[in-house]
Amino acid sequence: MRALCWQGTRHLSVEDVPEPRIRNPRDAIVRVGLSATCGSDLHLVNGYVPTMKKGDILGHEFVGEVVDAGPEVKTVKPGDRVVVPSFVACGQCWFCEQEMFSLCDTSNPNHAITEELFGDGSMGAVYGYSHAFGGYAGSHAEYIRVPFADVDCVKVPEGLEDEQVVFVSDALATGYMGADFCRIDDGDVIAVWGAGGVGQMAIASARLLGAERVIAIDRFPYRLRLAAEKAGADHVVNYEEENVLEALQELTGGRGPDACIDCVGMEAHAKGLEGAYDRAKNAVMLEQGRPHVLREMIRACRKGGTISILGVYGGLVDKFPIGIAMNKGLTFRMAQVHGQKYARRLLEHIEKGEIDPSYLITHRLPLEEGPRGYEIFNNKEEDCVRVVFAP
Amino acid sequence: MPGGTAWMAARQEGRGSKRNVGRAGRWLSLGAGGFLVRRALARPAPLRSILFTLFGVDLIRRGFTGSSRVYDALGIDTAERRDPALLPGNTLRFSRSITIYTPIDEVRAFIEEPSNLARVVPGVDSIESRCDKALFVVTVGGREIPFDVRRAGKHSIRFRARTWAFDIQDGRIDLAAAPGERGTEVAIRLAVRPLGGRIGAALAGALGDLPTKAFLGEALYRLRALLDAGEIPVSDDTSARRMPRVASGLLEATRS
């Protein structure tokens, strides 16, 4: 089958690879209908995530049809249309039972890689996202093997198109979880850094969960326009044109947002001395990522507010203002997405027409044009929000 | 012997000892201390001689007593695990524990079944029990290694190899119910005899014996996966060719 493979930093290619097969009794094979690019893929593409190997298949956000199932799979069968949360979860360990699916104790066969680094070797696994995170093949391919299919394949209700549900796999679930982390109350103002796919969904979810006002922060006018027109942001702030802290103070009567959601992660852009400092430390491997958004959120958030982190971080960051965070009494909530917890709830929201993520798709390409798709996505060309591939 | 709480208490007791410098470190201290004192006495110079003498004497004390105040302040203890001279027969001891979200009786029943253990222990062809489960014969690469096995209390199993030719000499598995109905705490302790006698043990100890740590980690991961998830997850074909050695063994074991 054909698959989009990682070959090195900013080097992708479409290759012939072996078709997946049932390896364990709880596996299913899914024929991929649509597979989306994700902002977190860019950390792989740009060489920020170690333990990638030449030939690894990318992609972790997809919808498709079950074509084969192992003997112990009970709830899905060949012919079922399913959306698959990006993290692999067994559904039976203690963490899965607590609905912390991305922390699954058993799903990562390469647990030893992160054991020393994280202090606990049982990090969860994700499709197409390095060997440290399980070494599972990604979804930018014609077929993909889905372990623990009863837990990880979520049936798509009839009448919903692939374009409507593909982001339940990751972007929508992640954005929704970020808003859920904020425990939104009456009158709450939520500020969202980053108006890419996850940011758009965090804005829409905060609105859905009852936020009084939502503020979107980004630097691309087309993304800010979408945030206002499609996701429901009340205010937008272009950080290249105005000071974010001053703008948020002004928009919140001097209080600061009740909760701040980071949808940017380790590759944030910062101007001036701070930006130069982070770039220099990254260049000499003394820091892994540029945590400008984290620093800004901690300063911006109201006293006693919540910092919700969805953006991906990979290692050590520097000049983290823990003193400000402690003295302001901030609450930090963060995780990789617990997709299985939210998938069915989100499909219901989509069925009821309460949220429609399909506007995120700005480019639909055949798999053979995968490298070009990532180039467009990485460079934010042609007002790109998300590229989807139809294998 | 339960896993978490009692084990932690035992570790705390061990830390009460003042001896925290390993054998190699003590010899080095003696040598360096003697050198400094000799140099101070050979070339008298007021300030330098006093400093060299004080430092040299302290190093000699460190060598004789095996106790370092700096190590104590930094929480370093190279005597505890890395000094093969403290252990009989040049063995190194390793321990590791995890919590499995499965009731203790199910865990115990599972690990007492040799065919289950064969799926858990990396690199093993088969495990058979004989003499009413008092003898387990582990086959590795076609070679049979007998282990005496005995229960020590309801939730503790001890095992000892009958031959000194095998690297794992003895060990124990302790089970304890985890608090809050979180399943079972499983603790494994192994005594390992590295290749190369005293030198091999010293080298392995100094390097932390990563293969043994990886072996223990992999065994416990497999145990948890089988008990909690019912299967051992495997990476995909496209990635398998490039996976680490331990994980490749896992693939082979699962295929068979």
Image (cartoon, rainbow, N blue to C red):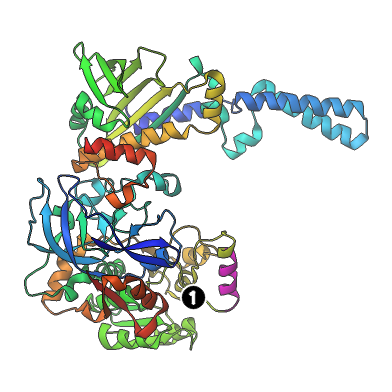
* Residue A195 location (% of width, % of height): 35, 79
- Image quadrant holding the C terminus of chain A, namely bottom left
Q: Amino acid at mark 1?
A: His
* Residue B53 location (% of width, % of height): 83, 29
Residue range of the region highlighted in magenta in the rendering: A272-281
- Of residues B144 and B172, the one nearer the viewer is B144
In the image, residue B7 sits, relative to residue B86, either above or below, namely below
In the image, residue A101 sits, relative to residue A304, either above or below, namely above
Any magenta on residue A279?
yes
Element at badge 1?
A: loop
Magenta stretch, main secondary structure class: helix
x 17%, y 70%: residue: A346
Which of the chains bears the disc numbered 1?
A
- Image quadrant holding the N terminus of chain A, namely bottom left
* Residue A59 location (% of width, % of height): 29, 64
x 49%, y 71%: residue: A292
| Residue position marked by numbered label 1 in the rendering | A269
Crowd around label 1: few <14 · some 14–19 · many ≥20 (10 Å)? some
x 43%, y 28%: residue: B94
